[in-house]
Image: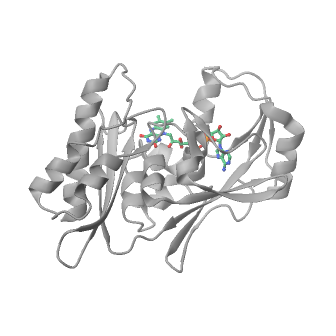
Amino acid sequence: MIPAQFDYVAPGSLDEALSALRSGGEDAKVLAGGHSLLPLMKLRLAAPSLLVDLRKVPGLAGIQRENGTIRIGAMTRHVDVVNGGLGLVSEAASTIADPQVRHRGTLGGSLAHGDPASDMPAVLLAYEGSVTIRGDVGQRECAAADLFQDFLTTAVGDGEILTEIRMPAMDGYGFGYHKFNRRQEDWAMVAACALVKKGADGSCEDVRIGLTHMGSTPLRATAAEQALRGKPLDAQSIAAAAEQAAEGTDPPADLNASADYKRHLARVLTRRALEDASS
Ligand SMILES: Cc1cc2nc3c(=O)[nH]c(=O)nc-3n(C[C@H](O)[C@H](O)[C@H](O)COP(=O)(O)OP(=O)(O)OC[C@H]3O[C@@H](n4cnc5c(N)ncnc54)[C@H](O)[C@@H]3O)c2cc1C
């Protein structure tokens, strides 16, 4: 439970942080809330030679809305997202672990880390949001669909800092979030989020479904989305669409659940999330 020795800096600006990362090379790591990185270091599954703490870098935390877009600073803590009145985003963040983790962990940290069992990556995917990534040679926008590349692997490269998350406000969409775990504060065995827009005739004009822990990255349940789009938002259509939620997924079996049980959970949780989003 004692990490390997490391150096630590807490720069006062983004440029200084990028410069520290550059001088630390590939063994330097960004430190945000520390609630994924520090456990890995204590278990000696990670041994960075330098931690670059972002907590003193100004301008990286906060939530802003402008012209139908929500902008969230990478260092915004889960608890501030919960209290931010952001619909599905706040609802999903409220299910993360316990108050201690929510008061230290950050949205940017969760997305840069790319754990497929984390709650927020599938939500960003369902919103079709994007992140801003700063590096030595300027900044780039990365769509959620391109961010999550594999288990604990994202498009945020060595020496880069995720600075901001952008999502459409999704005004007019209902939402639902269902997470299945053994204890309230546990990671998701499986979770499903849904965003539904009702047409004037009560049918499904648009639907987005995100799945957590159903593969090595967060996933969209595209077969279920296609099955519901244009259909009436009644119990029968929702149940029929949710039956397809596990199509194209490859859930990892673990001590909690077999792959088949996870597929069952995906179907049940998707139905419940769609029911909430359509009510
Ligand atoms: C007991 C426990 C239970 C938990 N349960 C849940 C849960 O139910 N659901 C859930 O979603 N999460 C859960 N978490 C994880 C928690 O949400 C973490 O806060 C989150 O995954 C990582 O955020 P962080 O700010 O702590 O990042 P850190 O631990 O500081 O960093 C994680 C990784 O991302 C990198 N990184 C961080 N920020 C940036 C950035 N801005 N730019 C580039 N790279 C960056 C770091 O270098 C590191 O590799 C749990 C954690 C613990 C300890």
Q: Residue 36 appears at what percent x and percent y?
A: 57, 36
In percent of the image, x 85 and y 35: which residue is there? 25
Position of the C terminus by quadrant: bottom left
In x, y percent, where is residue 27? Answer: 79, 30
Report whether 49 appears left or right of 208: right
Name the residue: 61% across, 57% down.
131
**98 over 225 or under it: above or below:** above
Tell me: 10 left or right of 191.
right
Q: Is residue 106 visible?
A: no
User: Is the residue 187 above or below the residue 120 in the image?
Assistant: above
- Work out whether residue 213 or residue 94 is closer to the camera in this orientation and state it: 213
**Residue 37 pos. (x, y %):** 62, 34
- In the rendered structure, the answer to whether residue 88 lies left or right of residue 168 reads left
Ligand 1 image position (quadrant)? top right
- Image-based side of 111 in relation to 29, left or right: left
User: Would residue 151 be visible to someone looking at this image?
Assistant: yes
Residue 40 % position (x, y): 60, 27
